[in-house]
Image: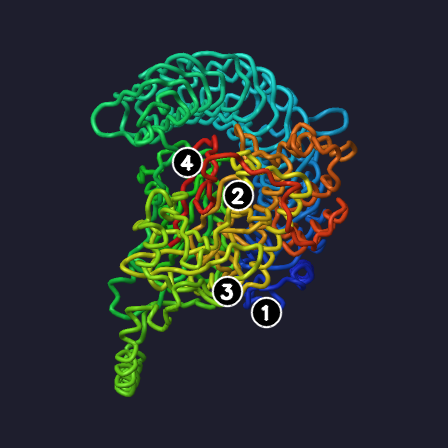
Amino acid sequence: MILLLLLLFQFLFIAAHDSNQDFTALSSLTESWGNKPPNWVGTDPCGGGWDGIGCTKSRVTTIQLPSMNLTGRLTDDIGGLTELGTLDLSYNKGMSGRIPPEIGNLRKLRTLSLVGCGFFGPIPDSLGALNQLTFLALNLNRLSGPIPRTFGNLSNVDWLDISDNQIEGPIPISDEQGPGLDMLLKTQHFHFGNNHLSGQVQPKLFNSNMILKHLLLDNNNLSGKIPDTIGLVKTLEVIRYNHNYMSGEVPSSIGNLTNLTDLYLGNNKLNGSMPDLTRLNSLATVDLSNNSFNSSSIPSWASSLPYLTTLTLENTGLQGKIPTSLFSQPNIETVIMRNNQLNGTLDVSNYKPNLALVDLGANKITDFAQKGQKITFVILVGNPICLETGADSKSYCTNSQNSITYSTGPNNCIPPSCRSNKVSHKCVFPYTGILTSKAPEFSNFGNESYFSELENSLLATFQNLHLPVDLVFLSNPFWDTFSGYLSLDLKVFPSQIDSFNRTGVVSISSVLSNQIYKAPGFFTPYIFNGSSSYDFSAECSSTKIHTGIIAGAVATGVVILVLSITVIFLIRQKKRTKAFNPFANWEQNNNSGNAPQLKGARWFSFEELKKYTNNFSDANAIGAGGYGKVYQAVLSSGELVAVKRASQESMQGAFEFKTEIELLSRVHHKNLVGLVGFCYDKGEQMLVYEYVPNGTIMDSLSGKSGIRMNWIRRLKVAVGAARGLAYLHELADPPIIHRDIKSSNILLDDHLNAKVADFGLSKLKDSDRGHITTQVKGTMGYMDPEYYMTQQLTVKSDVYSFGITMLELVTARKPIEQGKFIIREVLRIMDRSKELYNLHALIDPMIKQEGNPKGLEKFVDLALKCVNDHAEERPTMADVVKEIENILQLAGFNPNAESTSTSETYENASGGKIYHPYVDEDFAYTSVFPLVRVEPQ
């Protein structure tokens, strides 16, 4: 009996010691963390009901704290939690620092999810010791260095995601030096895209014992041939090799992958014959664009694959006729074959109803045949048929595509289960994030059935797991034409409560971060980037309110109502007139002959502007765009101005228009296009700007305007535009985020000084949330890559766009040409040990004529800092201004000298009307899909 008591005492002592050890380790680990759950009190994380902490037999076995807005670092104390099986800190962007090697001590760890945080530095080799690990997700961080060889020891891992980092070097395989990824025979997911991986993919990486489903290697620096051994992995469903430097022929063994649904090989250097995909009857998406295949006719498999939805063969050497059977396949939605040598007649008479886009721009098509109603989804720009007289009126001779939006948002902010309740409610607070498919098997975004099925499957998953979710809806589909990813805003609404508590948020986000939710096949593989700032201050336990409380509230409300109704009535009577006319308190300037000094905006009557533009005659028209038409006008004082006359479709509400005028009238800087006045009269909305005569820097670089810029002039233009942006970011009140910096939005005045155009109300910086709250405009090629995941723009997004514009000034190339991104092209051939960084092939010949342009290397270095993938590592615009000023001094020019003479750098075009830039013009990119406009809720 005594022996049994001694054994029991020893057992309890050991258990208490281990429990205390876990508390000590957890306390040390989280000591410097910010925003810890408020119920983390006491000394027993297992007995005190700590949010996010799970225990077994008084030992901490789970830490699940996604989307908790945590800040801090993972310290080496994590190694003390030796019973830990799950560690999920995803979507806490304030969690940063290096991943500690001590994490390798957690030998029982099965799930490690650190998605969407701020971790940086190398991945520790010690992770390879976690041989029980089945799920490893380190994507959406700032990790660098190589893939650890020791990953080859993760014999049980199923999901391996290190995408969207800065991982570099080759993909390791096993050899005499150690293990490699070819040993991962139970892994179904290699997600390595959007990194800096380089070198050849070795044939040994693939073998017939693998069960790999997703091979995502897109947007890296991989080179060499695609290994023929890839055909041994018969389980493969998705292959993404696009946006690399792969060469040679596509191996014929790919034809053996009969389970393949998505094949992305576009934007490489592949050559030889186009691959034969006849046997791949499961294929839904094929992208072979922008490679150097032998000239050939459209392959027969393009018309025979039964599940094919999206076919992209842009710039692949196609020639000959276009088979009509291509458009009558049962599931076909998108066909893109731009920049080939296809000829004859395009006949879509027998097209299927799912067909949403046929883009055959820049071929040799001479005729177009259709039946029935007018077809609006065909693009033939750049073909002989569009050079005929009157072709401009044909819809297929324009690049325009309908913007596509989707939303199943509720009519108000209350979930359905609350609407029958007679008690008043405040708005509920949804959990939000961005859901992204990395290989969508559909491209007809007008077909809402895809989105509906996705919503229904999400809701069913949450409810089957007994989570308090009442409503799920998706909105704002955004197609990234460079990556081919499809992103959607996700909102998850609570059931019977006003907001989720911490347990609810942890449960919902863990379902998505740990891939517990299984999306429909057309949306896989997917990633989720959850919100890191859910408002827990709105937590509520129930919508049921006690009757006594209601009675008291009603009585109090009656008293307040009686006391205030008279005051409210009087105030409303006083303001009634002004409420209907937001301009009522603005006094019109009757001195119609002079534009005001830049202290405010002058009010022009409709009749005045009608007179100054010769009745809005076509002779005065200098452009047209999304806003409407733009006219040159001459005021009675002789001053030239530009009048932007809004079309009916682009008009704002009166209050929004007034607010924009008030904002623009306060923004004054010599490097910003100034607002002279406005017209809000007779149902018209017009903005009157100063006239800037010498076009845009895009016009100059392309030769369109006839203005030539030497190296010094380009530096002056860059520093001027940078000063204008710095003013918007730091001195404007309120600060303004431009959102659409590009070479066509930087104008040149009489002395070729830069003036930034096209900023206003929709770019206001929200000081409370730090991001844009209205519709994102942007232009493909210039947009901040972080936007695609966060859907948020900051001043650093403008810095990124400006960095792209700097590279344009060096190369005179568009951001994306023939599917090649200028940043990648610069990095591909750049060698800092050589003259001009070995960029001779990319530098504008006009600059090279000057010999060795001083400061060009420093200018390129600065541009690359601006386009860093991670916003926090980019300089501010004020820093950019200082750096360019230093470069100007290095080039022998005083950066503070005013430009008053243009004889050295200005050469006007002879004859013809100079194109004017007050037009919403974007580049006509050779991209895969039309940009899907984001419409916020």
Q: Earlier in the sequence, mark 1 or mark 3?
A: 1
Rendering coords of residue 163 (x, y %): 58, 39
Q: Which mark is residue 696?
A: 2
* Residue ID for mark 4: 930
Q: CA distance from mark 1 to mark 2?
A: 61 Å
At 34% from the left edge and 39% from the top edge, which residue is drawn?
402
Q: Earlier in the sequence, mark 1 or mark 2?
A: 1
Q: Earlier in the sequence, mark 1 or mark 4?
A: 1
Q: Earlier in the sequence, mark 4 or mark 3?
A: 3
Would you call the spot at circle 4 few (<14 residues within 10 Å), some (14-19), or many (20 or more)? many
Q: CA distance from mark 4 to mark 3?
A: 40 Å
Q: Earlier in the sequence, mark 4 or mark 2?
A: 2
Q: Amino acid at mark 2?
A: Thr
**Residue 56 visible, this angle:** no
Residue at the farthest left position: 372
Rendering coords of residue 331 (x, y %): 33, 26
Residue at the farthest right position: 833
At 63% from the left edge and 28% from the top edge, which residue is drawn?
222
Would you call the spot at circle 3 few (<14 residues within 10 Å), some (14-19), or many (20 or more)? some
Residue in the foreground of this view, choosing between 569 and 104 = 569
Circle 2 SS class: loop
Q: Is residue 578 above or below residue 455?
A: below
Residue in the foreground of this view, choosing between 271 and 461 = 271
Q: Amino acid at mark 4?
A: Pro
* Residue ID for mark 1: 41
Residue in the foreground of this view, choosing between 330 and 611 = 611
Name the quadrant of the N terminus.
bottom right
* Residue ID for mark 3: 598
Q: Earlier in the sequence, mark 2 or mark 3?
A: 3
Rendering coords of residue 715 (x, y %): 67, 45
Q: CA distance from mark 2 to mark 3?
A: 23 Å
